[in-house]
Image: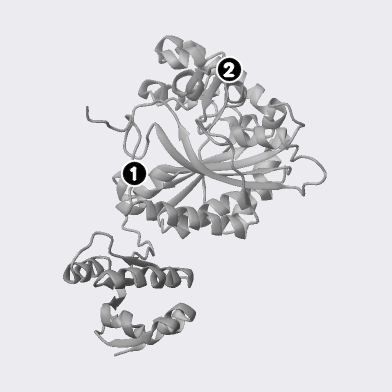
């Protein structure tokens, strides 16, 4: 039997994994500059964490979750997104307490799981990088978090980006708009897709998010939620727009954008890329928004929240398509060539000393002849080759060769084990 990975998953192999490490390291560095700290939550949660927070009319809950009952008959879900689990951790660990400075700013990265048709940049096991901010209602939080997302994507080499924003308002504004939207859509009920018919009275805003072409044609003439914002909601959205202007961040407003999750209110946003990966069409690479009621929904106090998430697979797809140069160094500092049994034993001590001095080092483990070992050193792009034979072991002296210039020097073993940094700098300087 030929074993294969499950459909919708991928093996991230050497040569590719370094790109992932680069993106993750870039995220950590950018987020650190905004004073965010990492949080790590379980890859599986209780079903109710997502059914209560994401919304029982969302595609995630109704169609896409990997859920099952474990041996204790607990209803478990492989996490389909990051926010709900982070909010659950915030509530359970009482990060809202006075001993935790506000706002609480965290980021996460890791695998998520959704059962959907695999396609380019969208897998059943996929990876997200996301952030959450708890404890402040200020529009400055919205704008600085959006700015951080833009900052991170630009650090990853993305060029042609577009920011799209909208406001879903507070509860009062949404309730007023909800009824207006139902009144508009009901005469078109028979023309709506089955999913939109199901959502019409449960969560009509989700109809605006439909990918069905007939639904999209109908909602094109729907009333705008921006016309139903009350004074509080209007003031918040106005402040967001003003602050984006202060930072010289251009944006567009899309009144039909609602995002796919039910917990959002006030500001929502998407950052879109016009990458070659998408054939010159703008596609979303990052999205998020404000969710002021989610902590209380999961048993905590009323807590303002704001966050975003982005898919790592899609981000790397864009970086590859747009030929973004990633500063990934595959070069090997030192390759040790051993000729004879005595040299093999001496090699072991030297290579460990070199590694402990902070250098990358490799040696032969397949009993190759000297010629084969030198070929391997070339394939691995070794900068320096250290050669040991019986005579070198007897004199306790090694030969080191600068592979770029061909220059060679001889160095006592003791100098290699006590100060290899100086030895390495000397051989690299040799001409």
- In the picture, which quadrant includes the N terminus? top left
The Cα–Cα distance between marks 1 and 2, rounded to whole angstroms, is: 44 Å
Residue 345 placement: quadrant: bottom left
Q: How would you rate the neighbour count of disc 1 (Cα within 10 Å): few for under 14, some for 14-19, many for 20 or more?
A: few
Q: What element does badge 1 sit on?
A: loop
Residue farthest bottom in this picture: 431
Residue 343 appears in the picture as rendered:
yes
Image coordinates for residue 264, horizontal then vertical, percent: 61, 32
Residue farthest top in this picture: 190
Comes first in the chain, label 1 or label 2: 2
Asked if labels 2 and 1 touch by Cβ distance under 8 angstroms, the answer is no
- In the picture, which quadrant includes the C terminus? bottom left
Q: In the figure, is residue 350 to the left or right of 68?
A: left
Q: What element does badge 2 sit on?
A: loop
Q: In the figure, is residue 383 to the left or right of 311?
A: left
Give 86 or 178, whichever is nearer the viewer: 86
| Image: 346 above or below 209 | below
Residue farthest right in this picture: 98
**Which residue corresponds to mark 2?**
74
Q: Residue at x 60, y 32 (%)?
A: 84
Q: Residue at x 34, y 66 (%)?
A: 362
Q: How is the image coloured?
A: one colour
Give 111 or 283, whichever is nearer the viewer: 111
Image coordinates for residue 314, horizontal then vertical, percent: 39, 44
Residue 281's label in the rendered image is 1
Give 371 or 145, whichever is nearer the viewer: 371
């Amino acid at each position: 039997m030929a074993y294969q990975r499950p459909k919708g998953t991928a093996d991230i192999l050497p040569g590719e994994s370094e790109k992932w490490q680069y993106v993750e390291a870039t995220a950590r560095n950018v987020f650190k500059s905004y004073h965010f700290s990492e949080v790590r939550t379980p890859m599986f949660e209780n079903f109710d964490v997502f059914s209560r927070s994401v919304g029982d009319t969302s595609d995630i809950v109704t169609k896409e979750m990997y859920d099952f009952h474990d041996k204790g008959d607990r209803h478990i879900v492989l996490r389909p997104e990051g926010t709900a689990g982070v909010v659950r951790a915030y509530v359970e660990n009482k990060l809202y307490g006075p001993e935790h400075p506000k706002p609480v700013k965290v980021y996460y990265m890791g695998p998520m799981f959704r059962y959907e048709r695999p396609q380019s940049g969208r897998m059943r096991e996929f990876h997200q990088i996301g952030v959450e901010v708890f404890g402040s209602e200020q529009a400055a939080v919205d704008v600085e978090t959006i700015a951080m997302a833009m900052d991170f994507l630009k650090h990853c080499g993305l060029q042609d980006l577009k920011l799209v924003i909208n406001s879903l308002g507070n509860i009062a504004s949404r309730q007023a708009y909800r009824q207006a939207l139902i009144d508009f859509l009901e005469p078109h009920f028979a023309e709506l897709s089955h999913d939109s018919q199901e959502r019409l009275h449960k969560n009509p805003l989700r109809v605006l998010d439909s990918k069905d072409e007939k639904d999209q044609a109908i909602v094109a003439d729907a009333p705008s939620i921006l016309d139903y914002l009350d004074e509080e909601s209007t003031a918040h959205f106005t402040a967001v727009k003003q602050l984006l202007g202060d930072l010289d961040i251009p944006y567009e407003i899309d009144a039909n954008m609602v995002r796919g999750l039910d917990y959002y209110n006030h500001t929502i946003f998407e950052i879109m890329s016009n990458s070659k990966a998408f054939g010159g069409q703008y596609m979303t690479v990052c999205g998020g928004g404000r969710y002021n009621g989610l902590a209380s929904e999961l048993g905590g106090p009323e807590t303002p929240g704001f966050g975003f998430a982005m898919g790592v697979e899609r981000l790397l797809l864009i970086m590859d398509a747009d030929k973004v140069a990633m500063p990934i160094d595959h070069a090997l500092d030192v390759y040790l060539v051993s000729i004879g049994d005595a040299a093999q034993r001496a090699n072991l001590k030297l290579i460990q000393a070199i590694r402990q001095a902070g250098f990358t080092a490799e040696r032969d483990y397949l009993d190759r002849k000297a010629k084969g070992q030198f070929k391997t050193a070339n394939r691995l792009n070794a900068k320096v080759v250290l050669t040991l034979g019986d005579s070198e072991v007897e004199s306790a002296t090694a030969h080191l060769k600068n592979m770029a210039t061909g220059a060679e020097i001889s160095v006592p073993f003791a100098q290699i084990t006590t100060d290899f940094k100086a030895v390495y700098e000397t051989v690299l300087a040799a001409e």
